[in-house]
Image (cartoon, grey):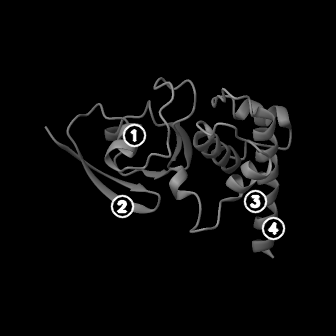
Amino acid sequence: MPIPITLTVNGAAQAVVLEDARVTLLDLLRERLQLTGTKKGCDRGQCGACTILVDGRRVNACLALAVSHDGAELLTIEGLAEGDTLHPVQEAFIAHDALQCGYCTPGQIMSAVGLIREGQAGDDPERIREGMSGNLCRCGAYAGITEAVRDAQARLRQHDRGEAA
C-alpha cells in the first residue's frame, strides 16, 4: 500500500510516495532524491556518516524511518552552503585540515552544525570531542575536527554579534 509523505529537504518541499514503510531517511535521500552527500557507513547508527539535521536536531538517517518523519524539515550537507558561499563549519573544516579521505566528512560537518546550534559545543576541546563522539573517522582527523568546531563556533558567534549591532 503506497504511503504518501511530505518533507522539506534543504528548504524545498518534497512529496514522496513510499512503497515500503521500512524505507529509511538515508535511503530516501540517496536513492529517491539523489542527495548522495549523506553517506551510508555502518547502516547501524554507530558511525555517524549519515548524520543529518531533522527539525534542527542531529539524527542518524540510517536509523530513521521516512514514514515517521512526515512533515519534517531535513537539512543535509547539500543544503548547508548558500550558493557558492560555504557555511562557516565547512570553511573551518577546510582551514583546519579536518578531513583525510573525506568519507565521514558530511556527517562530521552536519554533526558539528547541530552541536553548535544546540549550544552544546562550548570552548573546551574535551566537550567538543564528547559532543562529536557519535561520528567516527577511520583516518583519525579528530584533532583537526575539534579545532574546526572551535573555530566555526567562534566565527558564528562573531557573525551573530555583527548582526545584532
Residue drawn at point x = 58 percent, y = 44 percent: 106
Q: The C terminus is located in which quarter?
A: bottom right
Label 3 to label 4: alpha-carbon separation: 9 Å
Near mark 3 (Cα within 10 A), the count class, few <14, some 14-19 or many ≥20, is some
In this view of the protein, which residue sits in the foreground, 138 or 53?
138
Amino acid type at image mark 4: Arg
Q: Label 4 neighbourhood size at 10 Å, few (<14), some (14-19), many (20+)?
A: few
Q: Amino acid at mark 1?
A: Leu
CA distance for labels 3 and 2: 27 Å
Foreground residue, 136 or 69? 136
Question: Can you identify the residue that label 2 sits on?
Answer: 13
Asked if the residue under mark 3 is in contact with the one under mark 1, i.e. CB atoms within 8 Å, the reply is no
Secondary element at tag 2:
strand
Q: Residue at x 64, y 28 (%)?
A: 136
Q: Which residue is mark 3?
A: 156
Distance from disc 1 to disc 3, alpha carbons, whole Å, reads 28 Å
Neighbours of disc 2 within 10 Å: few (<14), some (14-19), many (20+) = few
Which class describes the residues within 10 Å of circle 1: few (<14), some (14-19), or many (20+)? many
Q: To which quarter of the image does residue 31 belong?
A: top left
Percent position of residue 79, x then y = 52, 58
**Residue bearing the label numbered 4:** 161
Q: Earlier in the sequence, mark 3 or mark 4?
A: 3
